[in-house]
Amino acid sequence: MVVEDLSVRLKVYEGRPAVRGGLGKDPVNSPMIRHWCEAMGDTNPAYTGPDAIAPPTMLQVWTMGGLSGHETRSSAYEELLALLDGAGYTSVVATDCEQEYLRALRPGDEISFDSVIESVSDRKTTKLGTGYFVTTRMDVRVGGELAGTHRFRILKYAPRAAAPPQDPPPRRPRPVVNRDNAGFWEGVARHRLLIQRCTGCGTLRFPWLPGCNACGSPEWDTVEASGEGTVHSYVVMHHPPFPAFDPPYAVGLIELAEGVRMISNVIGVPYDKVRIGMPVRLAFVRYDEELELPVFRAEEGVRA
Amino acid sequence: MRAGDGLPPLRIPITRTLVVAGAIASRDYQDVHHDPELARRRGSPDVFMNILTTNGLVGRYVTDCFGPRAVLRRVAIRLGAPNYPGDTMVLSGTVEEVDGDTATVKIVGENGIGRHVTGTVTVTVPAEGVVSPAEGVV
């Protein structure tokens, strides 16, 4: 089937009912409230005792089909799902939930509900796979009185072929170690970040090179970095994805306290909270049994 | 409460038990929330938390912070990085707007792989002696 053709066929369902005359399988009741509160770790006293209300966020729970399914789903909604299943979009995951609570629900309340297919998206590609977002809007009533509204968005998607379980997880690329930079990696193995220093003119240099850019001398020794630095600049990597890397992530150009700059990951802070001038401190992170890398952790207090 | 106020963060260990207990307490028997093998066949590395549990945890977080008198008016959430067993989610929140006794709170839940949930919660905290939480606000 041509994709455009499917999109057009799906759009036809917008505005049609998803559920007509749905009834809660159980009245609002104390045992289900208690099981919910236990699972959520919710000890709010409003949900127990003789005047108990149901946690408002349980709104959808009272409308669920459970193992016995949804008898009141409309034929339009069943057709829409079958169309997607038939085209290979067999899996479902919920992405959005918007609820408004107009009246508290209490044990004994009998729930009724109606739902409409609000929209069907164009075909989208997500991390899980390619699929279509379907948005429904439900009115939940008790005895004819509107108790709450519930907008729900699912992604019906074609699962990407799962990697065979015996495949080892992807590993980061290996550093190229040669006679010019071996000393640096020996330092990393001992959790020391070593900077080259020209013994001719004293200029520090990083990354490691065979000779001094300032005076040309091939003679050098090392100084150990204190580990303190600041973010001189950074980029956030979104695309393309590489094996063993999980975008988005921040790559920083770190200015060490000694004055040289080094490219590395910034950790300990969300990728979108990295800022120029942010103080960072050296850390060593082990990525697999043979690869350990110097990275920079945002100093405490900068998250706020 | 004032706009700009931060809520104390809440750390929630994502155990397999929490994922399954949340799914069953919400009457959600989708296999991806209790069967790891079927979850893998659907392209997920493991079972993951269902949206109703996330919704419940966000509601709990806000009423924990605002106290038992708080009445939830609206909860709107969007899911991102899934909550897999073994991870930890840290919920945090910021009061965005205050109108009388009603606050709009922005909620974020971060786990080890990214942002699991972003949301907006509207909550009313009636003044002492005006109304009990069970009544709601009329």
Image (cartoon, coloured by chain):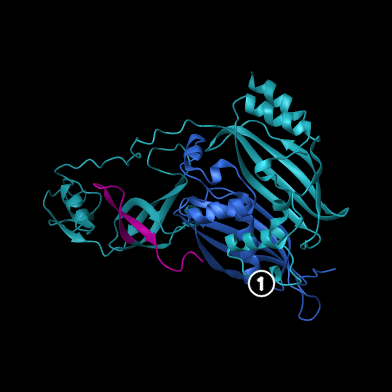
Which quadrant: the N terminus of chain A?
top right
Residue B22 visible: yes
Q: Which residues are magenta?
A: A282-304
**Residue in the foreground of this view, choosing between A147 and A254:** A147
Residue B4 visible: no
Residue B8: image quadrant is bottom right
Q: Tag 1: Cα neighbours inside 10 Å, few (<14), some, or many (≥20)?
A: some
Q: Secondary structure at mark 1?
A: helix
Image side of residue A173 versus residue B90, left or right: left
Residue at 62% over, 45% down: A95
Chain in cyan in the render: A
Chain in blue in the render: B
**Measured along the vertical axis of the image, is residue A141 above or below residue B102?**
above
**Measured along the vertical axis of the image, is residue A105 above or below residue A85?**
below
**Residue in the foreground of this view, choosing between A221 and B4:** B4
Residue at 64% over, 55% down: B55
Residue A189: % across, % down: 20, 54
**Measured along the vertical axis of the image, is residue A245 above or below residue A160?**
below
Residue A138: % across, % down: 78, 46
